[in-house]
Amino acid sequence: MPYLLVLPTLLYLAIFFAYPMVSALQLAVQADVRYLNLRAEPDVTAERLPGTIAMQTVVDIIDRERGEEELASGRTRPIFWYLVEAQTVDEETVTGWVNQRNIFVESRTESVTGRINDGEPVTEWTTRHIRTMVNDFRFNSALRNTMLMIVIILPIQFVVAIIMALVLQAQPRGSTMFLYIFAIPLGISDLAAGLVWYSLFTQRGFINSFLVQMGILDSPFIFIASGQLGWILLAIVLAEVWRATSIVMVIVVSGLQAIPRDYLESGQVFGATLWQRIRYIVLPLLRPSLQVALILRTILAFQVFAVVIAISGGDVFTVLANETFRWYDRGDGGYNNPNVAAAYAGLIMIISLAISFFYLRAIRSQEETTG
């Protein structure tokens, strides 16, 4: 019976995790290329000679032969075959026949050289897409900005979320209203949150209007500009903290509900201060919940995209998720290269898995440690 209960989970992981992950990694390390094999005779059914020729290879034309090709309508048309000498991808010389469809010549009857321009599709393993990603001029800044955001955002979110959860756990007067206020950002999309904070920091936004009206500034200060990366980072951090801290709070609140009140009351009876009760009672018992929250928020932090686009436009300040979209996009600003986009997505996945594994090893409950 337990195995039947596990089966839906395994199917879910296989369909929505394993298959997309393997497909993305294959797309990042595979390339569809075309190679040509020469024929032993000037005939499409003739034996293919060993040795493949890469596209755009210049070949020497030794001889040519004109034949007839039958069309689907039953008519025939002239077709040329060329006896060529070429270098294979293994730098070996091979001589054989090639159809006019696979070679470009300036003159069918007079040219002495040609260039291979078509062949059979082949899928091969390559690191070219990964090298393209690493050599991309935005790669270093995207990786640095992503890691910087995680280092800054996660500690702030967890401190604020624990404080919010403790406030709700204490059940002060109006605690239900606090819960509603804390949960408001959960109903707002990433893009909407980014637009809200962009409207605060823009030149005519609330912050500038308030500072000018109070006489603190004579004219609006430009927070969001190409030379103000610090302010752009601050705006994105504040938007993400405001938007996603409630997710951590919900997990922490559920963890606090599992802590017996007797533990806290006993600590208070024995004279433990609030900080001592939090440090020695609450946090150790919250380790499983904090582990889940850390893994979830780290994975989601790597996917931050809409907030960055809304505030910075994605060019002045970029992150890994933004570069993934840029390389996949087919629009005016995109590069239309799914292979490099898959390399970026694979990098995000690998880093997320590595950090999640680190969390699982570093933050363990007391039972797991002693066991």
Image (cartoon, grey):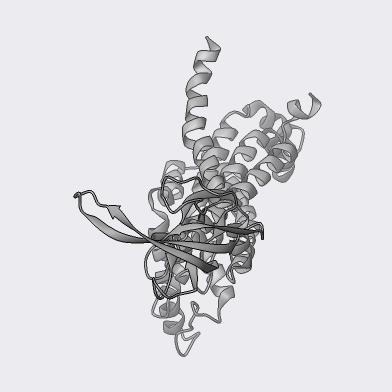
In the visual, does 89 lie left or right of 332?
A: right
* Front one among 340 and 186: 340
Residue 238 point in image, percent of width and height: 52, 63
Q: Position of residue 58 (x, y in %)?
A: 54, 69
Compared to residue 85, the image places residue 345 above or below, namely above
Residue 167, visible in the rendered structure: no
Query: Which residue is at the front of the view, 200 or 300?
Result: 300
Q: Quadrant of the C terminus?
A: top right
Where does residue 41 sit, x and y in percent of width and height?
47, 51
Please name the residue shown 56% across and 69% down the image: 233
Residue 301 at x, y = what percent? 55, 53
Q: Nearer the viewer, residue 149 or 335?
A: 335
User: Would residue 24 be found to the left or right of residue 184 on screen?
Assistant: right
Residue at position x 78%, y 30% from top?
A: 369
Left or right of 57, for residue 76: left
Residue extending farthest top: 1
Instruction: Residue at the far bottom: name it.
Output: 218
User: Which is more toward the observer, 80 or 130?
Assistant: 80
